[in-house]
Amino acid sequence: LTQDAPDKRANFSALTEHNTNGVARSSAVASSKTGASKKLVIKNFKDRPKLAENYTEDTWLKLRDAVGAIQNSTSIKYNLEELYQAVENLCSYKVSPTLYKQLRQVCEDHVQAQIHQFREYPFFLSFLKRMNRCWQDHCRQTIMIRSIFLFLDRTYVLQNSLLPSIWDTGLELFRTHIVNDSGVQKRTVDGILEQIELERNGETVDRSLLRSLLGMLSDLQVYKDSFEERFLVETNRLYAAEGQRLMQERDVPEYLHHVAHRLEEENDRVMSYLDQSTQKPLINCVEKQLLGEHMTAILQKGLSTLLDENRVTELALLYQLFSKVKGGLPTLLQFWRDYIKTFGGEIVGTPEKDKDMVQDLLDFKDKMDNVAQGCFARNESFINAMKEAFETFINKRPNKPAELIAKYVDSKLRAGNKEATEEELERILDKIMIIFRFIHGKDVFEAFYKKDLAKRLLVGKSASVDAEKSMLSKLKHECGAAFTSKLEGMFKDMELSKDIMIQFKQYTQNQSEPSNIELTVNILTMGYWPSYTPMEVHLPAEMVKLQEVFKLFYLGKHSGRKLQWQPTLGHAVLKTEFKEGKKELQVSLFQTLVLLMFNEGEEFSVEEIRTATGIEEGELRRTLQSLACGKARVLNKNPRGKDVEDGDRFNFNNDFKHKLFRIKINQIQMKETVEEQVSTTERVFQDRQYQIDAAVVRIMKMRKTLSHNLLVSELYNQLKFPVKPGDLKKRIESLIDRDYMERDKETPNQYHYVA
């Protein structure tokens, strides 16, 4: 104790000699120097007070009585503070070891005396309740006893690391004498397991009782050995039997909901009364027995149904459950891939369904996308497996899907397609592009798309130039500029033709003899457009004259070019008079030639019409059918019937009626004939042969010498369409015959390039 202030010095100097409390004046106090520090020293008693005789014994008797009263739940005679003080006094006089032993003995005697009460409960539930009451009493008593002997617990016991605390001693005694008794332990665990089984079977049990007893086993550190091992064995047995039974009895959606419910129940059990350490092995056990053992059976029995019926809730549940089981997702992935291949294979491989194939594919893709996104958590593996499966089944039937996709796009881009707004049309085209990506033979698509685009542009049937250009840019982005260069050329031709027609109109206005026919010509660059078979037909003199005028005008501006007229895609608007009044008919050029004949006569036979017009027979029959057997019958056929026969005669239907002023009858031009379809396919195969030849020559020119296998492998890398090894072999043979390459004389499997 230091004191610097000079005015307080007198108070300390008053302490001159030892007083009874052992406070002595420090020599520093005598220092006369101002500002010097002073010290106050406190010393212990010289003589320690002695305990009275028999104090230890009397005090222990008092303490033992108090402990007995606590154990028997009677009132304590003494004041608790007095008892605590008594323990403190004994500990101060080194009686702690004896006191600790005596206390332990008293507690042990009491616990040993409790065991007899557990012999007399025949039923599990009453036994469990008695056990719980005994445990609760024991805990309460131990806490009370410890509060009296707290000083002993906090000094002597704390300083001796080998001694258990009073609380731990209480647990140890209860474990040794009661819970480790084989009969008591078996009945306790059997009783708990019985209660859990009752609850699993749907009955209500006392959860707080179970929580307390399992807490007891946990506190006594016998939970794992005495209870958990048996509990998991029982759980395993129960769910193994339940899984086998319910897989037979229930359908898959019901079974999946049952499994989810069971898992929820078991998790709830862990939260309510089981130890947290049991959760993992318990849930693993349920998942293994209800799911792991039946994965293949569940998928074989129910996946197709769930996907067919689009049961998204159950599919999401299936994915969620399978993701918990080892090997669950890979198994589900394999079944999902197989389902897509099977279902898609049916769509593509059934020729009777060709009409709806593309729409079915789009719907199927949408459905699978929704499942992958909504039910399978956007799992990358599932999305990739779906793409791979689509690519596999769509190419199982070569060429046809590509052709039908092109025709589907044509139906959507054609004028009169009122089912979609521009935004919807854009969405449809985006979906089509996804399916288009899966196709290997994209050249087939290009050929049919080009043919249909030509018709849309030339007959003026395109719904929207914006939609056409949008589709073109999508194809360009997907396949590169080379793929769309010809298609873009077709659009350029149409735009140039418009400019030429403006100039031609000015040119004809300056002519001395203006014509009463308004002529529009589209100039097509031969390489860009599909090739059309030239057909010579007999045009009216006035039309021929106009053609010659245009030819003079065009070749006057572009010398050195050759014009070839293509009547197949020509169309006209005819002004007609019926009894009902005047109408305008929008017709093809062939229909025009047929109808104009009825200005010259009343009735004609098929043969007479053919001779007069020069139209090829098949084309003529289609034309007459469209005029006499379709919705707008401007001609009468005699005899009536759907098909045109050789002996049929036709006359003009003067009684024709229609609500519209302008009637379109030239839909026939947009329809594809079987011949057209065959010739387009043949042209694709012809182009493929040229491409194979060019690729072989290109590779051989670069490598000079190459084995057959390496050449074929290189060709597969370069060619963008599917091709069979046999076809490649034929092309190689053809090039050898034409002296582009030769076989090695010693090794026939080796080729050399011939410069």
Image (tube, grey):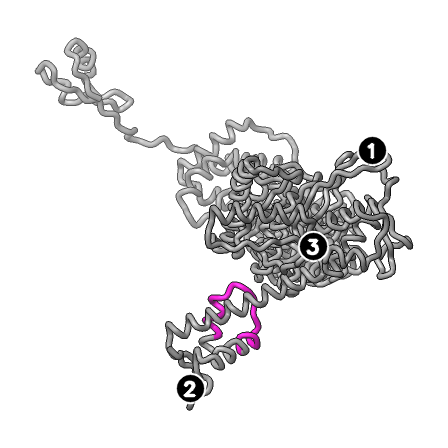
| Residue 540 percent coordinates (x, y) | 70, 49
- Amino acid tagged 3: His
| Residue 248 percent coordinates (x, y) | 79, 60
Residue 399: within the magenta?
no
In the rendered image, which residue does mark 3 sit on? Answer: 538
- How crowded is the residue under tag 2: few (<14 C-alpha within 10 Å), some, or many (20+)? some
- Amino acid tagged 2: Asp
Residue reaching furthest left? Answer: 33
From this viewpoint, is residue 50 visible?
A: yes
In the rendered image, which residue does mark 1 sit on? Answer: 581
**Side of 171 where 27 appears, left or right:** left
Residue reaching furthest right? Answer: 639
Q: Residue at x 48, y 35 (%)?
A: 150
Measure the C-alpha gap from mark 1 to mark 3.
Answer: 30 Å
| Mark 1, secondary structure of its residue | strand
User: Does the CB distance between marks 3 and 2 fall below 8 Å?
Assistant: no
- How crowded is the residue under tag 3: few (<14 C-alpha within 10 Å), some, or many (20+)? some
Residue 724: within the magenta?
yes
